[in-house]
């Protein structure tokens, strides 16, 4: 049912936790399945003076697919500019995990939505 890569990210999630002084926080959930995600970003500037995601963490309450999606999303987004991170798609997340059962695609949507909400939260504070 799940790919080996998805199971690896579920069993050993990357970037799990919170960032106490986060630049932005995105909180999303799916009332139908009960999955809840919080994505934390820490923004800094790179050598070109572009805003980048210097650190990213997540807290997810949900199924194996939700946790794995959160984990892989943080790997994809780390170090990207905010504009690059905004353009991450659910298809990228699914492809990185090695496909998802159709009934679990919503997990990738939640992760991407959480990241976009964190970016929106950061930008609204500026």
Image (cartoon, rainbow, N blue to C red):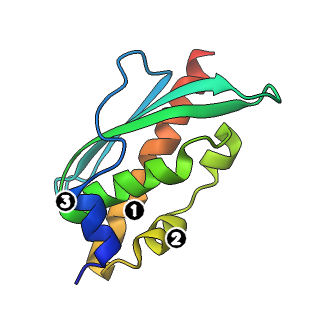
User: Is label 1 in a helix, a strand or a loop?
Assistant: helix
Question: Label 1 belongs to which residue?
Answer: 108
Are circles 2 and 1 on residues that touch, CB within 8 Å? Answer: yes
Instruction: Tell me the number on the disc at residue 32.
Output: 3
Q: Earlier in the sequence, mark 2 or mark 1?
A: 2
In which quadrant will I find the N terminus? bottom left
Q: Residue 46 in the image: x percent, y percent?
A: 73, 29
> Could you tell me which secondary element the residue under label 3 belongs to?
loop
Above or below 97: residue 31: above
- The answer for how far apart the CA atoms under marks 3 and 1 are is 15 Å
Seen as rendered, the residue at the extreme bottom is 1
Taking the image as shown, residue 9 lies to the left or right of residue 94, namely left
Q: Position of residue 17 (x, y in %)?
A: 28, 34
Residue at x 40%, y 70% (from the top left corner): 97
Determine contact: label 3, label 1, CB under 8 Å: no
Residue 19 sits in quarter:
top left
Q: Is the residue 115 above or below the residue 43 in the image?
A: below
Q: Which mark, residue 91?
A: 2
The residue shown at (49%, 32%) is: 55
Q: Residues within 10 Å of mark 1 (few under 14, many from 20)?
A: many
**Within 10 angstroms of label 3, few (less than 14), some, or many (20 or more) residues?**
few
Q: Earlier in the sequence, mark 3 or mark 1?
A: 3
| Relative to 109, 50 lies left or right | right
Q: Secondary structure at mark 2?
A: helix
Position of residue 104 in the picture relative to residue 75 (left or right): left
At 48% from the left edge and 51% from the top edge, which residue is drawn? 75
Quarter-wise, where is residue 54 in the image? top right
């Amino acid at each position: 049912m799940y790919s080996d890569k998805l199971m690896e990210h579920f069993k050993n999630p990357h970037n799990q936790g919170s960032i106490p002084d986060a630049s932005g926080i995105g909180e999303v959930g799916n009332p139908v399945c009960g999955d809840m995600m919080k994505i934390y970003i820490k923004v800094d500037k790179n050598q070109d003076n572009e805003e980048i995601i210097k650190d990213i963490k997540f807290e997810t309450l949900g199924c194996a697919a939700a946790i794995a999606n959160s984990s892989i999303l943080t790997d994809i987004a780390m170090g990207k500019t905010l504009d690059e991170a905004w353009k991450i798609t659910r298809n990228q997340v699914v492809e990185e995990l090695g496909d998802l059962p159709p009934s679990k695609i919503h997990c990738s949507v939640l992760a991407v939505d959480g990241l976009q909400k964190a970016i929106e939260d950061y930008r609204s504070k500026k």
